Image (tube, coloured by chain):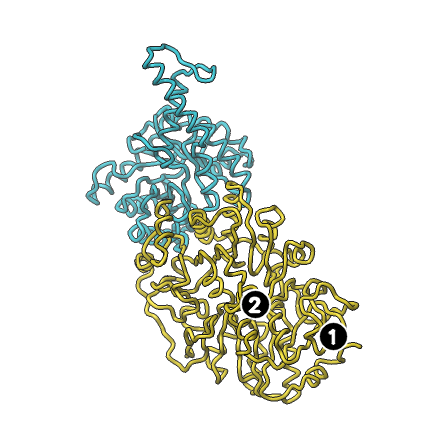
Chain colours: A cyan, B yellow
């Protein structure tokens, strides 16, 4: 489970060295946009060195690769899969066929490296109108697909929309990608907030993403990690309410009651499911003891 | 009666300036100071030689000093800090006699006790009256506190106040009192305000420094010291100042009010005073304009002398009432000895200032530093210069973990109980070396160019010339 995923340029030794000290649950080592065409190979080598030396224990390791149709993608996959990242992030994914093509290359790299099939998962980056419209088929296209990720900057450009902090132009895309991911039973991550100096704006954006159903959110600056983690961490009040809900349900079952209520409000299945999810997250984050 | 002299030359002559004397200066004007340069130029013009400079700190603005050394005007230096431009020249052996480094508290004690004799104290004063009452609160070069000049004024055989802002008698309040002053000299300018204090001290935006300071705040939180009456000192740079950013919400959450903030005071501590996080500020030096305005206008923000700040022989001092101090380091060794005098090549680029004083006095002395700097691990087997003895350092906080001095088993346990990432310091060293490799230490082997005196007067270490 990742609340935050921090982008780290694959060509910056200094940032790679300290990538895992900022408290991000996931790290996206970037070979795509952050790296100029002439530096792709150097970045692959740096990322290899960083992963082999530092390992980044405790973080979900994601490597963002270049899109299909570029001269870099095959080499990216061939060189990155042996590092056994938890996830590869293919970019500008527009269809299920794109995922299949990537997955085939990953499978070949796994076989060549002697890794079991499906060692490396995928988190496709949907950042085109086509990608958003095909979100559900992408989410269901391959067992490697563990989550979807919304990229609002390229998407806004593709839509010919004006990118704003409030995000009205991506409201549909956010709803659509969450719907698709949840329908496919996988996680879904929100686009980063790009103003590194606007802490209040970040908090609002992260709170909105959580309210919309996103699992977590990406960060382009280490400064944003703590705010995102806070937004996606259940509050003490939420945890306490969830505990009460489950206690009331247990008591109802013990007494053989068909319907139960808490503080005058009916407790139905969706409320119970949400309470279980809150407690499950709290346990994962070490905020609550108990079995998952 | 007036003590106003028409020129610094007249005042120096009146005080009997001659070869072999010791002249003292304070560093409240920092890298904007003009007075040390004016005074040495005057001495050189008068043909004076063999002076010993007793300066509380030296900055690169004092670079003309190097020529005065070469020409024999200055043959001895005693100071608490030296920035890298001057330090480079000293490390290359420009001065025959070793520099004597002290701490701020050690210098005050040496002067108060008579171990150091000052013939003439030349005190730069942002505001003064004709009888020598002086302070740092007014005038174009206002710098706030004059705490480091106070022992000099009290004990020097002669005192000259140099100002560019004469006010009608009596100036109030007086940091330097007329009872100690022989001469007052008005000059066009005592310094460049741009180099004296910064407009506002900004907290670092470096994410690694912020990660370190976040962890440092957690160490304070779980040290048992963060309670009503908490007292605190931190430096103005890097991760040190940023610790306050994370302390503030913790103090708010615990609903505690600190007793005092100490030391070099920044606008950030002034904000905390104004917002009620601390009851008072004890200020030996102001770092920015906000601090200068506050010490002038807020009676709860008071100037203290270097003696009251940190003298080891005083009956009590502020550092001995201090709960937590956050300090930097260029190196720390596996025995927790800290180097703040030299860089990793052994070249002088700093000094103790109040480092060893606060480390000795505070209940929790914490070093914050990145695990490696420019490909070199911060933790080494043996520091190139021992500035602060390891037995006075409680904990090292880096971005990848915390090391607690084995002498502090209680703190070690408390931090482990709080599930903070505590490692033996050897392991932090190895962690860094896994990334950087094991560097070859270039230990300078030239003649001794500086001696580091501990605050109690004993010799702590020596610094050798760099080729």
Q: Is residue A269 visible?
A: yes
> Quarter holding the C terminus of chain B?
bottom left
Q: Please report contact status of discs 1 and 2: CB closer than 8 Å, yes or no.
A: no
* SS for callout 2: helix
What residue sits right under mark 1 in the picture? B186
> Does B198 appear above or below A264?
below
Q: Nearer the viewer, residue A90 or B8?
A: B8
**With respect to residue A79, does B317 lie above or below?**
below
Tell which tag, 1 or 2, sits nearer the viewer: 2
Labelled disc at residue B307: 2
Location of residue A126 in the rendering, given as x and y in whole percent from the top left corner: 41, 34
- Tally of numbered discs: 2
Q: Is residue B239 visible?
A: no
Packing grade of label 2 (10 A; few <14, some 14-19, many >=20) is: many
- The residue sitting at the left extreme is A114
Task: Calculate the distance from the C-alpha at mark 1 to the C-alpha at mark 2.
Answer: 28 Å
Image quadrant in which the N terminus of chain B is located: bottom right
Image vertical order of residue B23 relative to residue A73, above or below? below
Q: Residue at x 48, y 46 (%)?
A: A223
Residue at image location 56% in from the left, 67% down from the top = B307
Q: Horizontal and vertical percent for residue B445?
A: 37, 79
Query: Could you say which disc has been placed on residue A99 in the image?
Result: none
Residue at position x 54%, y 75% in the image: B113
Residue B341 left/right relative to A97: right
Query: Which residue shows up at 34% across the image and 51% down it?
Result: A47
């Amino acid at each position: 489970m990742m609340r935050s995923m921090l982008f780290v340029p694959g060509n910056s030794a200094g940032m790679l060295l300290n990538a895992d000290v900022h408290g991000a649950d996931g790290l996206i080592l970037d070979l795509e946009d952050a790296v100029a065409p002439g530096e792709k190979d150097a970045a692959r080598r740096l990322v290899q060195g960083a992963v082999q030396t530092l390992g980044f224990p405790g973080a979900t390791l994601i490597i963002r690769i270049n899109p299909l149709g570029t001269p870099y993608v095959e080499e990216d996959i061939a060189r990155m899969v042996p590092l056994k990242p938890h996830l590869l992030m293919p970019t500008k994914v527009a269809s299920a066929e794109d995922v299949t093509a990537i997955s085939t290359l990953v499978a070949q790299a796994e076989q060549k490296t002697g890794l079991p099939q499906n060692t490396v998962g995928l988190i496709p980056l949907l950042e085109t109108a086509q990608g958003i419209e095909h979100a559900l088929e992408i989410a269901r296209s391959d067992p490697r697909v563990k989550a979807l990720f919304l990229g609002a900057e390229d998407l806004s450009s593709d839509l010919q929309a004006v990118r704003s902090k409030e995000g009205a132009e991506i409201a549909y895309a956010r709803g659509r990608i969450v719907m698709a991911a949840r329908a496919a039973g996988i996680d879904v991550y929100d686009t980063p907030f790009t103003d590194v100096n606007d802490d209040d704006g970040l908090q609002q954006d992260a709170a909105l993403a959580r309210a919309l159903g996103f699992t977590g959110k990406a960060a382009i600056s280490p400064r944003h990690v703590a705010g995102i983690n806070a937004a996606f961490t259940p509050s003490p009040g939420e945890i306490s309410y969830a505990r009460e809900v489950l206690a009331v349900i247990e008591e109802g079952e013990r007494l053989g009651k068909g319907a139960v209520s808490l503080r005058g409000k009916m407790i139905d299945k969706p409320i119970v499911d949400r309470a279980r999810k809150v407690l499950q997250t709290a346990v994962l984050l070490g905020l609550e003891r108990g079995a998952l | 009666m007036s003590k106003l002299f028409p020129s610094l030359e007249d005042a120096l002559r009146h005080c009997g300036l001659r070869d072999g004397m010791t002249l003292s200066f304070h560093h409240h004007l920092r890298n904007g100071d003009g007075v040390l340069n004016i005074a040495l130029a005057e001495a050189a013009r008068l043909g004076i030689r063999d002076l010993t400079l007793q300066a509380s700190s030296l900055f690169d603005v004092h670079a003309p000093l190097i020529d005065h050394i070469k020409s024999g005007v200055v043959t001895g230096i005693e100071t608490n800090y030296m920035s890298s431009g001057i330090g480079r020249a000293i490390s290359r052996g420009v001065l025959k006699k070793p520099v004597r480094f002290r701490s701020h508290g050690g210098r005050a004690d040496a002067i108060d006790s008579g171990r150091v004799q000052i013939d003439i104290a030349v005190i730069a004063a942002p505001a003064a009256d004709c009888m020598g009452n002086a302070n740092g609160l007014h005038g174009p070069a206002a710098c706030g506190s004059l705490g480091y000049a106070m022992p000099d004024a009290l004990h020097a055989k002669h005192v000259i106040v140099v100002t560019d802002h004469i006010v009608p008698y009596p100036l109030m309040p007086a940091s330097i009192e007329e009872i100690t002053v022989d001469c007052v000299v008005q000059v066009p300018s005592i310094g460049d305000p741009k180099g004296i204090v910064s407009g506002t001290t900004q907290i670092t935006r470096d994410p690694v420094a912020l990660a370190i300071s976040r962890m440092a705040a957690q160490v304070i939180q779980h040290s048992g010291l963060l309670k009503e009456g908490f007292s605190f000192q931190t430096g103005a740079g890097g991760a040190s100042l940023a610790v306050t950013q994370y302390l503030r919400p913790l103090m708010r959450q615990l609903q505690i009010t600190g007793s005092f903030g100490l030391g070099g005071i920044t606008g950030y501590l002034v904000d905390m005073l104004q917002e009620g996080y601390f009851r008072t500020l004890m200020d030996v030096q102001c770092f920015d304009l906000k601090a200068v305005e506050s010490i002038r206008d807020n009676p709860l923000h008071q100037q203290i002398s270097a003696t009251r700040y940190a003298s080891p022989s005083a009956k009590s001092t502020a550092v001995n009432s201090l709960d937590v101090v956050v300090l930097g380091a260029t190196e720390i060794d596996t025995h927790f000895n800290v180097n703040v005098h030299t860089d990793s090549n052994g070249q002088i680029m700093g000094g103790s200032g109040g480092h060893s004083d606060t480390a000795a006095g505070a209940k929790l002395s914490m070093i914050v530093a990145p695990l490696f700097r420019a490909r070199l691990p911060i933790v080494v087997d043996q520091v190139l210069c021992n500035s602060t003895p390891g037995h006075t350092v409680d904990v090292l906080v880096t971005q990848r973990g915390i090391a607690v001095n084995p002498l502090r088993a209680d703190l070690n346990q408390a931090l482990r109980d709080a599930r903070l990432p505590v490692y033996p310091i050897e392991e932090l060293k190895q962690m860094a070396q896994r990334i950087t490799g094991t560097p070859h230490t270039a230990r300078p082997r030239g003649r001794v160019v500086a001696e580091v005196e501990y605050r109690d007067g004993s010799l702590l270490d020596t610094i050798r010339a760099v080729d």
